[in-house]
Image (cartoon, helix red, strand yellow):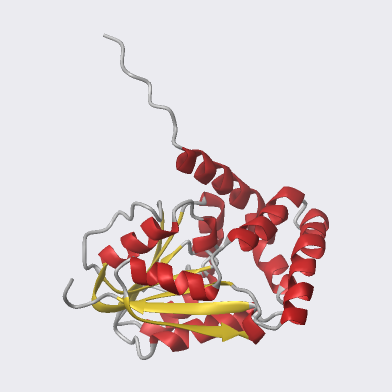
Amino acid sequence: MSQERKTPSANTIQGNTIQKMFDSIAKRYDSLNSLLSWGLDARWRKALVRELGDIRGKQGIDICCGTGKLTSLLAKAVGETGSMTGLDFSAGMLVIASRRSSTVKQVRFLQGDALALPFADDTFDFATVAWGLRNVPDIPQALSEMRRVVKPGGKIVSLDMAEPPNAILKDIYWFLFARVVPWLGKYFAKNHKAYQHLYHSALIFPKQEVLSQIFKAAGLTEIEYQNLSCGVTAIVRGCKPFVD
């Protein structure tokens, strides 16, 4: 008896394409990100950690963890009595992440899908995602999964591209994204298409006010957003309610 062949969904195809793209740029990813942000990316990650408050002894998960820079920072914040799990779909990124945290006992890295997290309900005290939501094909589903695996009262925090409220700065911002970022990707990361994707993903990614509404639609409460560096990036935060 012949079996029915399943046609890959659009989400699966898009996810596989982006996965291969990140594998191809993994080795140059950190250095080029620091160049593109003028070194501000480190400051933005620290701002996210501060947004979580005192997380000593807590268990957290960092979704779309990439090369593990934020995961490692969070591992220091939770301390030896806490634990951090970093999850990403790119094997190339995870190789670098594992090397970065090879001496840190309280952190582990797993390959997995942000849209179908391999964890039970109410597993973690908090969840983070940095520059990852704009690369998932279904943002509401990713937030729903983060909400599911976080304990009631736990925070879910996103750090990602935003849009400056100042009109002049906004024009400069989009010019740099459209012209300079792909050029740098071509000559430094040797992958022009990957950094064209960065521009297009930022162009269609929900701005901070809209993303806050998506957090609300996902069933999160106490939602706030904080602009960083004049709104070039933003932190959006929500909490899982104690009672649904």
Looking at the image, residue 85 lies above or below residue 40: above
Q: Position of residue 65 (x, y in %)?
A: 48, 64
Looking at the image, residue 69 lies above or below residue 200: below
Q: Does the image show residue 217?
A: yes
Name the residue located 51 percent from the left edge and 46 percent from the top edge: 15
Residue lying at the far top of the rendered structure: 1
Q: Position of residue 155 (x, y in %)?
A: 34, 78
Name the residue located 38 percent from the left edge and 90 percent from the top edge: 53
Name the residue located 68 percent from the left edge and 69 percent from the top edge: 33
Q: Does the image show residue 61?
A: no
- Quadrant of the rendering where the N terminus is positioned: top left
Residue lying at the far front of the rendered structure: 167
Q: Position of residue 145 (x, y in %)?
A: 32, 60
Residue lying at the far left of the rendered structure: 243
Q: Is residue 72 left or right of residue 23?
A: left
Looking at the image, residue 238 lies above or below residue 191: below
Looking at the image, residue 186 lies above or below residue 17: below
- 107 or 206, which is in the foreground? 206
Q: Is residue 88 left or right of residue 145?
A: right
